[in-house]
Amino acid sequence: MIGIEISETLKTVYAAQIEDRDGQYQVIVPEREVEAGTITTGETYRVALLTSPTNQADATETSNRASTDAEAYNGPPVSTGDRRTVDIESTGDQGDGIAKIDNGYVLIVPEATVGDRVTVEIDQARDNVGFATVVDRHPGSV
């Protein structure tokens, strides 16, 4: 198993869409992030934005689905030991691969790069982010 070093100051990781509201841009924070106690309403936080390869139609559909699903949130969509085949969509600040599964849930995958299709085993599943290790690489990935 590969050790994953996570900054103590990391509060949350989730997928969201930036919205233009009368010339001001907003990132909507899912209610579950506040309920989990990782962040507090009325506080100021520094954020990092990662691009997504989705087109506008996909982003709108994902946003609408996430709004509905947030109301019925029952914890992370994976558990420790689960295996999933994922596509690495972006790279984090530490160089780890980032994949999104079930309604934008983020998996951080060391030793994976953008374009990789890999099967991973979940090492840790937090309410807002999971950490996984590559157990198999699939042909045709970069």
Image: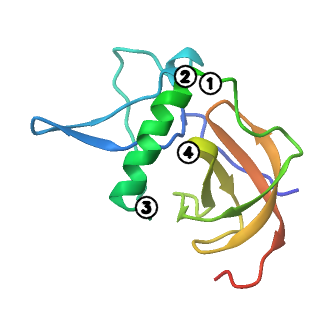
Question: What amino acid is labelled 3 in the image?
Answer: Thr
Mark closer to the chain start, 2 or 3: 2
Which numbered disc, 1 or 3, marks the residue that appears first in the sequence?
3
Q: CA distance from mark 3 to mark 4?
A: 12 Å
Q: Which residue is mark 2?
A: 32
Disc 1 to disc 3: CB gap under 8 Å: no
Q: Residue at x 44, y 59 (%)?
A: 52
Which corner quadrant holds the C terminus?
bottom right
Q: Quadrant of the N terminus?
A: bottom right
Alpha carbon separation for disc pair 2 and 1: 7 Å
Whether residue 49 is visible, yes or no, is no
1 or 4: tag closer to the N-terminus = 1
Residue 20 visible within the image: yes
Q: In 3D space, how far apart are the residues under numbered discs 4 and 2 (Cα atoms)?
A: 13 Å
The residue that appears at 75% across and 68% down in the rendered structure is 118
Q: Work out how far the residue at label 1 is from the one at label 4, CA to CA, in angstroms.
A: 13 Å
User: What percent of the width, then of the height, locates residue 97?
Assistant: 62, 62
Residue 54 is labelled as: 3
Label 1 SS:
loop
**Residue at the (54%, 58%) spot, across then down:** 92
Mark in the foreground, 2 or 1: 1
Which comes sooner in the sequence, label 3 or label 4? 3
Question: Which secondary structure, mark 3?
Answer: loop
Q: Amino acid at mark 1?
A: Tyr
Amino acid residing under circle 4: Gly
What is the three-letter code of the residue carrying label 2?
A: Arg
- Do the numbered discs 2 and 1 sit on residues whose CB atoms are within 8 Å? yes
The residue under the point 78% across, 77% down is: 138
| Residue at numbered disc 1 | 73
Residue, disc 4: 104
Q: Vertical placement of 99 versus 103: above or below?
A: below
